[in-house]
Amino acid sequence: MRILPIIIISLSVLLSTGCSKGGAINGRSFKTALQSVKMMKGRLPQEQRIAFELSFWAIRTAYRKNSEFLDIVDGKTSDELIEVGKEVFEKRKADGFEEYQQYASWDEMISKYAQERAAQTTKKKYSRRDAENSVLYKL
């Protein structure tokens, strides 16, 4: 008797997870789009994360209306979003968008942001005091 509810719950979870677009952005609302982007970003290799983030926000700054923006990003995979981001970069650079004028190309902008991110994530020196402040208890 106990096993039947467990099986039903398991099947419903599997079906809902299996039928969802896990590798694509959910554009139903801005909130769900942000959640999808956060989940997708965590799955990407480090080299693609910066291009993915910059693409998402470049599209967002170009299309301020939520309806336009969500129509563009809905259902896009990470590679498709990066391609759209490149197109937006090229279009806005040609239109004279001030922030993009300092970069010769998309790849140059990505490498600059990658260098900045690498400089921010420097490793901290290990201190003996850190070991003393551990929350792990010795039994």
Image (tube, rainbow, N blue to C red):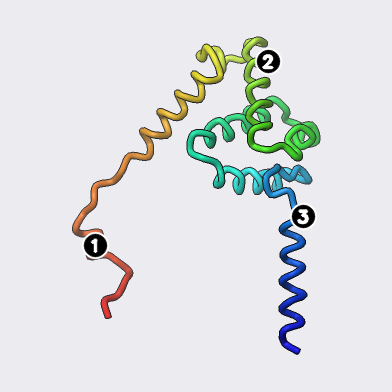
Structural crowding at the residue carrying mark 2, measured as other residues with C-alpha within 10 Å and reported as few (<14), some (14–19) or many (≥20): few
Q: Earlier in the sequence, mark 2 or mark 1?
A: 2
Please tell me the numbered disc located at residue 30. none
Q: Quadrant of residue 54?
A: top right
Structural crowding at the residue carrying mark 3, measured as other residues with C-alpha within 10 Å and reported as few (<14), some (14–19) or many (≥20): few
Q: Position of residue 20 (x, y in %)?
A: 75, 53
Q: Earlier in the sequence, mark 1 or mark 3?
A: 3
The answer to which of 89 and 31 lies nearer the viewer is 89
Q: Earlier in the sequence, mark 3 or mark 2?
A: 3
Q: Quadrant of residue 7?
A: bottom right
Q: Disc 3 to disc 2, how far (Cα)?
A: 36 Å
With 24 as the anchor, is 102 left or right in this view? left
Q: Disc 1 to disc 3, how far (Cα)?
A: 46 Å
Q: Position of residue 106 (x, y in %)?
A: 56, 19
Residue position marked by numbered label 3 in the rendering: 19
Residue position marked by numbered label 2 in the rendering: 91
Q: Could you tell me if the residues under marks 2 and 1 are in contact, i.e. CB atoms within 8 Å?
A: no
